[in-house]
Amino acid sequence: MKLYDSVGPNPRVVRIAMAEKGMTIDTVTVDLMGGENRRGDYKARVPIGTLPALELDDGRIITEVTAIVDYLEELQPSPPVIGATPADRAETRMWVRRMDLLVFEPMSNGFRASEGRGLFESRITLVSPEAAAELKSLAQEKLLWLDGQLQGRTWVCGERFTFADIMLMAFLEFGAQIGQPMPAAATWLPGFLERAAARPSAKA
């Protein structure tokens, strides 16, 4: 296998998941900032142009972090980052899906269409700057909703550290870097981020 890696929260999610599982995969670094993912050999190999991507031994390409981490979990079930039982796996995937739709997508698209516009406007279709502001506001609103839902828990899925926590940590840190820090009114998220960032895997 070969992992096509780069900067950004999505590649980092896969690296952290690999670290949690104790997995090592040959890695190729792709210059996202320079647009290498949108041209040449990489675009021919990965037409959607996104990162990360996992190339299997038979040449097939897997993209999207959820699909990649699911595949790694199938290959090496223990230690689990999704879950050891059907119920645990469903719970993890439920939270990942919620956070992806409600927080991470509006956060990312809001950045791409505002502060990141100069980098992305020649590569992908963007919403208007006005819509970008609305997307950022929506992400903040849903982060506060999430903060309320997770009160009293250690991790997103209770006492299990999972893929959902990896995603949340990576995007909270990404948000802080792009001018979208967690809402000041959040009370659970700050402690969560401190706990997650203290794990050895967070250095991946």
Image (cartoon, rainbow, N blue to C red):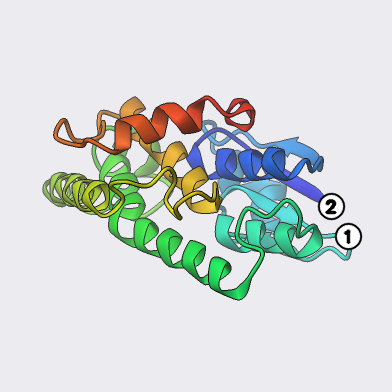
**First in residue order: circle 2 vs circle 1:** 2
Which residue is at a point 84% across and 52% down the rendered structure image?
1
Which residue is at a point 34% across and 54% down the rendered structure image?
105
Query: Identity of the amino acid at label 1?
Result: Asp
Q: Is residue 175 left or right of residue 23?
A: left
Residue 148 on image: x %, y %: 21, 50
Secondary-structure class at tag 1: loop
Which residue is at a point 81% across and 43% down the rendered structure image?
25
Tell me if I can see residue 174 in this picture. no
Q: Which quadrant would residue 5 be assigned to in this image?
A: top right
Q: Is residue 115 above or below residue 150?
A: above
Residue 102 or residue 118, whichever sits in front: 102
Residue hosting label 2: 1
Residue 174 or residue 57, whichever sits in front: 174
Residue 185 on image: x %, y %: 14, 35
**Quadrant holding the C terminus:** top right
Q: Are marks 2 and 1 in contact (CB under 8 Å)?
A: yes
Query: Marks 2/1: CA distance?
Result: 5 Å
Query: Identity of the amino acid at label 2?
Result: Met
Residue 195 on image: x %, y %: 46, 30
Q: Is residue 36 above or below residue 55?
A: above
Q: Residue 23: give its label.
A: none
Q: Residues within 10 Å of mark 1 (few under 14, many from 20)?
A: few
Residue hosting label 1: 57
Q: Is residue 26 left or right of residue 97?
A: right
Q: How many marks?
A: 2
Q: Which quadrant would residue 178 be assigned to in this image?
A: top left
Residue 134 or residue 116, whichever sits in front: 134
